[in-house]
Image: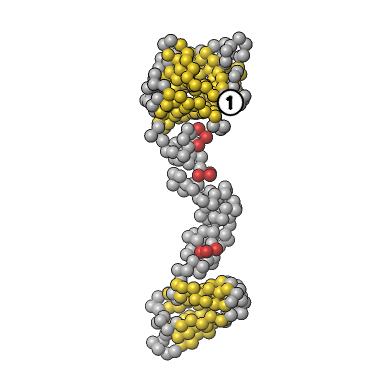
Amino acid sequence: MVLKTDMSSHAGHVTHLPRHGRSGVFLLAIWAGGLLGSCVFDPFVHVVHDGRDGGVRDAYMDDGSGEEGGVVIGDAAFRRDGSGWTEAGTNQDAALRDSDQDGVPDNADNCPQQANPGQTDRDGDGVGDACDNCPGASNSNQEDLDQDGQGDVCDSDKDGDGLDNEVDPRPEHADEVLLKASGLGLPPVLIWQSGSWNGSGAVCATETSERAVAVVSSPALGADYIVQAKVTGIQKNLAGQPWPSTGLVARWNGALQGYLCVVDLKNHRLVIGKYDGSGWHELHATADVPDRTEYVLRFRLDGSQLTCWVLPEGIHAETSDGAFTSGQAGFFTYYTKACFTYLSVVSLP
């Protein structure tokens, strides 16, 4: 196929430079008091000078290949397809532009703003490793919630609030972190406790014949927050007890005053309740909690609205109660041995 373009608008001259790369390929540079553009193409190129101001009247190109492609000559752009050469517009045409000058046109370049002639893409997501914010994990959308340059799919703290995703009650919201306790052990984590506790790397209730409460946070956390913890190694005592349980305390004030989010290990329920001066009160419960030896529990206290979850299933119980408006957070067991590996608390917006 043959390309012909009128170059009379380009004062200056056309220069053939040495062979560029593969055999039979030349670099054509068009000058007009400075470099206007360049292109790499297969021969043959024919340049006609018309003698006016030393300018170039016509440039012809015949590559003989018939293959699809494109070139930029000066500020004109041309595209080649099966039917021949056609003018495609200016050199801003995406089909021809090569912004990073790596030899791959922008519309075919998996990193158009960063040179990567090899186009390496280990995770196969269509984004080259050179500009992929998670080159080892497929993420074609390149989402980066906290704008730290590390994509969400491989960012251990994608909201950038200082809590790793797996221990963050709201991993997609950069909340104020009120408490971050991981690798728990005794002492000095607990500020108040009843029952028998010990541990290194976890806080563990060690008896199945008592009620045990361990408060972690100090000072009081205020009114509205979400607390999350993981409980493992559960061993329950079913002999003669109505329902052994384990879970979280929140807005805890004193020896036995505050709210609980617990798993009833005998009846497989998720329960929200409270202790006050008159004893235990069950506020709401839901059934169908899986029978396991470990759980992740989340407890949200938003004004008088109380919601308790088992994760990852998302099973939840919710109710409304205004007896307690502030207090601390911690762990609870009743006729159950269990270990808690972390406790995270974030403020509600």
Residue at the image position 43 percent from the left and 78 percent from the top: 31
Kindly give the residue lying farthest to the bottom in the view shown. Answer: 51
> Of residues 247 and 177, which is closer to you in this image?
247
Residue at the image position 62 percent from the left and 77 percent from the top: 65
Answer whether residue 38 is visible to the viewer in this image.
Answer: no
Q: Amino acid at mark 1?
A: Val
Place residue 253 in its image quadrant: top left
Left or right: where 203 falls relative to 34: right
> Of residues 217 and 246, which is closer to you in this image?
246
Residue at the image position 54 percent from the left and 20 percent from the top: 246
> Of residues 42 and 305, which is closer to you in this image?
305
Disc 1 marks which residue? 289
- Check disc 1 and report its element: helix, strand or loop: loop
Left or right: where 264 falls relative to 170: right
Left or right: where 156 falls relative to 293: left
Residue 23 x/y as whole percent: 61, 75
- From what the image shows, is residue 177 above or below residue 190? below
Residue 186 x/y as whole percent: 50, 20
- Image quarter where the N terminus lies is bottom right
